Image (spheres, rainbow, N blue to C red):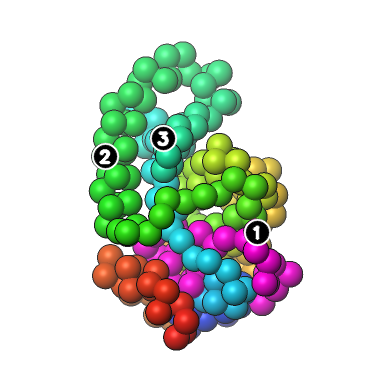
């Protein structure tokens, strides 16, 4: 069974997150761009604020998909302690990666945040949302970043992901909500009837308070 589109996926996730509805300490964070339409449905259903979490994974230079850490707004830099123990000189090797990804993060922050205030995560329940998980590296980086930003609780909410990624994320997050965990998994797009690319303009439109109120 597949989702009609990202909005339907968000509504199904929202039903599984109903216990967080109406709480003043909850914030819904989307990983742009594909996570934004999903997260908007969740935020609307929970009557919670919606924002984006522009996290940039720090890939090991010789194996970029391997998450050695992450950077996040507010100068947060997080390193994977296991890899740091295994790879001598990892921090030094990551310096050019950090510089490159920081520039990209700042570009995206300026594009998406505009005049909205900076994220305030401390002591809040952060529900971090994407439209699905393939490798899991970006979501792992997001969880690490939210820990460093002192979230009281981190809840990962995704419509679909392989079971192995869910097991890994369960060790990092306080809770993982993923209704579909197929053993046969090739790409996130295969689990949606409609899976068009989300544009920057659509992200900005969905983040407008008016869009939240009308949806």
Q: Which numbered disc flags the more N-terminal residue, 1 or 2?
A: 1
Q: Which numbered disc flags the more N-terminal residue, 3 or 2?
A: 3
Q: Which numbered disc flags the more N-terminal residue, 3 or 1?
A: 1
Q: Secondary structure at mark 3?
A: loop
Residue in view at x 42 percent, y 14 percent: 89
Seen in the picture, residue 36 relative to 78 is either above or below; the reply is below
Of badges 3 and 1, the one in the foreground is: 1
Q: Secondary structure at mark 2?
A: helix
Which label is found at residue 75? 3
Asked if residue 53 lies left or right of residue 108, the reply is right
Percent position of residue 103, x then y: 26, 39
The residue segment tinted magenta is: 15-40
Residue in view at x 47 percent, y 51 percent: 119
Percent position of residue 70, x then y: 45, 37
Asked if residue 154 lies left or right of residue 56, the reply is right
Residue in view at x 39 percent, y 30 percent: 60
The total number of labels drawn is 3
Seen in the picture, residue 202 relative to 95 is either above or below; the reply is below
Cα separation, mark 3 vs mark 2, equals 12 Å
Cα separation, mark 3 vs mark 1, equals 23 Å
Q: Nearer the viewer, residue 98 or 192?
A: 98
């Amino acid at each position: 069974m597949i989702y009609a589109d990202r909005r339907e996926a968000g509504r199904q996730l929202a039903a599984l997150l109903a216990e967080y509805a109406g709480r003043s300490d909850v914030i819904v964070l989307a990983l742009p761009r594909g996570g934004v339409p999903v997260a908007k449905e969740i935020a609307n259903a929970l009557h919670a604020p919606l924002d984006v979490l522009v996290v940039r994974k720090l890939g090991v230079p010789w194996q970029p998909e391997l998450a050695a850490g992450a950077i996040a707004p507010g100068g947060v830099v997080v390193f994977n302690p296991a890899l740091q123990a295994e790879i001598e000189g990892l921090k030094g090797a990551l310096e050019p990666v950090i510089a490159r990804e920081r520039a990209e993060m700042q570009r995206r922050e300026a594009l998406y945040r505009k005049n909205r205030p900076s994220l305030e995560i401390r002591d809040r329940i952060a529900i971090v949302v994407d439209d699905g998980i393939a490798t899991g590296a970006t979501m792992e980086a997001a969880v690490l970043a939210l820990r460093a930003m002192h979230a009281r609780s981190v809840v990962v909410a995704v419509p679909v992901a392989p079971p192995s990624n869910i097991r890994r994320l369960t060790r990092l997050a306080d809770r993982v909500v993923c209704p579909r965990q197929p053993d046969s998994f090739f790409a996130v797009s295969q689990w949606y009837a409609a899976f068009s690319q989300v544009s920057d303009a659509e992200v900005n439109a969905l983040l407008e308070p008016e869009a939240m109120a009308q949806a």
